[in-house]
Image (cartoon, helix red, strand yellow):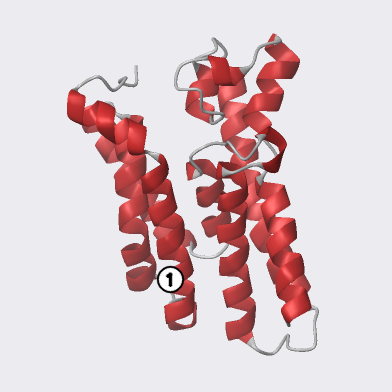
């Protein structure tokens, strides 16, 4: 179990750490996305380089790596001798989601400086708590539509997500350890938006157009 946990944690972190936004902008535009806008490697800042297509590609790939990490955990844990222990498998899947998000935020390939983890979290938790993800995305769309602040929509969705999981997911997916990992992921996302929070309070945050 310890060896399996370590493998899932490391693989999930490495999957999450692939800096797709940085790579796409470097390959197709010859630029360092970290020198643009907020300096973030996520989809919103990639789009600010002048290519919405690369922004969309970054969004999808960042989500895909989170989804792949959780699916890998399900596959590997389900193939082991405790495959009948659904609680252990679900806990490892939640750990994979957390580690993938951590990898995106603190990628080893960019000196542990990465993105904010929103797209990666959406992909990861779509494989673990899909109904909660859908509602969180609806909240995101509503907040962005009303305020034009993508950062605020992301934080509202992230903050509400643990409660949505608790209310909307099956009981076996809402144990205390799983919810703690989900809440930790949400907290990390909100904390990574600290600069956005400062700009929101100062009235200088960029609005989505």
Residue at 25% across, 19% down = 204
Foreground pick, 44 / 60:
44
Q: Is residue 74 left or right of residue 171?
A: right
Q: Position of residue 92 (x, y in %)?
A: 63, 73
Q: Position of residue 163 (x, y in %)?
A: 31, 65
Foreground pick, 3 / 24:
3
The reply to whether residue 78 is in sight is no
Q: Position of residue 4 (x, y in %)?
A: 76, 75
Residue at 34% across, 21% down = 208
Foreground pick, 143 / 113:
113
Residue at 43% across, 77% down = 174
Q: Is residue 158 above or below residue 87?
A: above
The reply to whether residue 5 is in sight is yes
| The C terminus sits in image quarter | top left
Foreground pick, 107 / 181:
107
Q: Is residue 82 above or below residue 129?
A: below
| Quarter of the view holding residue 107 | top right
Q: Is residue 110 left or right of residue 191?
A: right
Q: Is residue 79 above or below residue 82?
A: above
Q: Which residue is mark 1?
A: 180
Q: Is residue 20 left or right of residue 127?
A: right
| The N terminus sits in image quarter | bottom right
For disc 1, the neighbor class at 10 Å (few under 14, some 14 to 19, many from 20) is: some
Q: Is residue 32 above or below residue 95?
A: above
């Amino acid at each position: 179990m310890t060896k399996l946990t370590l493998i899932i944690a490391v693989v999930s972190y490495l999957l999450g750490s692939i800096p797709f936004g940085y790579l796409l902008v470097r390959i197709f535009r010859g630029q360092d996305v970290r020198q643009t806008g907020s300096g973030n490697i996520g989809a919103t800042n990639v789009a600010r380089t002048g290519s919405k297509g690369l922004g969309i590609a970054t969004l999808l790939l960042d989500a895909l790596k989170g989804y792949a990490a959780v699916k890998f955990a399900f596959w590997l844990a389900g193939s082991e001798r405790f495959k009948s222990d659904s609680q252990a498998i679900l806990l490892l899947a939640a750990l994979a989601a957390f580690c993938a998000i951590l990898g995106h935020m603190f990628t080893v390939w960019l000196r542990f400086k990465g993105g904010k983890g929103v797209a990666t979290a959406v992909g990861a938790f779509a494989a673990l708590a899909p109904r909660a993800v859908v509602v969180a995305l609806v909240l995101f769309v509503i907040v962005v539509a009303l305020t034009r602040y993508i950062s605020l929509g992301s934080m509202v969705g992230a903050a509400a997500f643990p409660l949505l999981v608790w209310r909307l997911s099956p009981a076996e997916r809402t144990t205390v350890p799983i919810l703690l990992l989900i809440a930790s992921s949400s907290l990390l996302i909100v904390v990574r938006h600290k600069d956005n929070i400062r700009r929101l309070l100062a009235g200088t945050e960029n609005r989505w157009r």
